[in-house]
Amino acid sequence: MKAKMNAMEDSLQRFSHKETQLLVAIEALHTVTTRQGKKLEAYKTKKEKLKAKIGERNVLIRKLKKERDDLKSTSEATQKEFQNMHDEITCLQNELLQTQEYAGKLESENRELSTRMKKLESRRRSEKGKKSYNALPRVSMSNSYVASKRATEELQAKIEQKLFGEMGLNGRAMQESSQQEPKRSI
C-alpha cells in the first residue's frame, strides 16, 4: 500500500499544477458525490419509512372512517329506536291518562252504586223485618199443626194398640202392617 501511495505521489508530482488542481477537484467531487449518494440513500430510506408510516396512517384513517360510518349508522339506528321508544312512551302516557280518567269515572260511579246499594240494603232489611214479622205467626201455626198431627198420630197408635190388643193376633198383624206403611210428614 505504501508503494501505491508512493507511486501516486510520484505521478502527482509529474502532473502539472493545473492537472493537480483538476485531480483535487475530481477527488473533491468524488467525495461530494459519495456524501450526496449516502445522503440520497439516507433520504430514500427515510422516504421509504415515511411511505410506510403514511401507509399505516392511511390504513388507520380508513379504519377510523369505517368506525365513524359504523358509529354514524349505529347512532342513526339508536336515534330511530329512541324516537320509537319516545313515541311509544307518549302513547302509553296518553293511554294512562285515559285510563286514569276512566278509573275516576268508574270510581264515582262505584260510589254512586255503593250509595244506592246501601239504600237498597236498608230497604231490604226493613222489608225483610216486616216479612219476618208477618211470617212468624204462620211458622208458629205450622209448628203447632205438625205438633198436633204428631199428638194425633200417637193417640191413634195408642187407641189401635188397645183395640188390637183386645182382638188378639189379628190385631198384631194389622198393627205390623200399619207400622210398615210409611208415615207422611209435612
Image: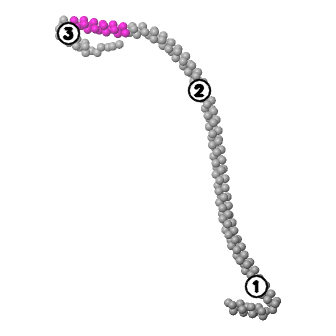
- Which numbered circle lies on residue 160? none
* Up-down relation of residue 53 to residue 114 (above or below): below
Q: Secondary structure at mark 3?
A: helix
Residue occupying the point 60% across, 24% down: 108
Residue occupying the point 67% across, 63% down: 57
Residue type (three-letter) at the residue carrying disc 3:
Gly
Residue 160 magenta-highlighted: yes
Specify the quadrant that holds the N terminus.
Answer: bottom right
Q: Secondary structure at mark 2?
A: helix
* Up-down relation of residue 57 to residue 142 (above or below): below
Q: Is residue 23 left or right of residue 182?
A: right
Residue type (three-letter) at the residue carrying disc 2:
Leu
Question: Which mark sits nearer the N-terminus, 3 or 1?
Answer: 1
Residue type (three-letter) at the residue carrying disc 1:
Glu
Foreground residue, 51 or 39? Answer: 39
Q: Nearer the viewer, mark 2 or mark 1?
A: 1
Residues rendered magenta in the picture:
143-162
Which residue in the structure is indicated by mark 2?
A: 106
The main secondary structure of the magenta stretch is helix
Question: Which mark sits nearer the N-terminus, 2 or 1?
Answer: 1
* Up-down relation of residue 51 to residue 24 (above or below): above
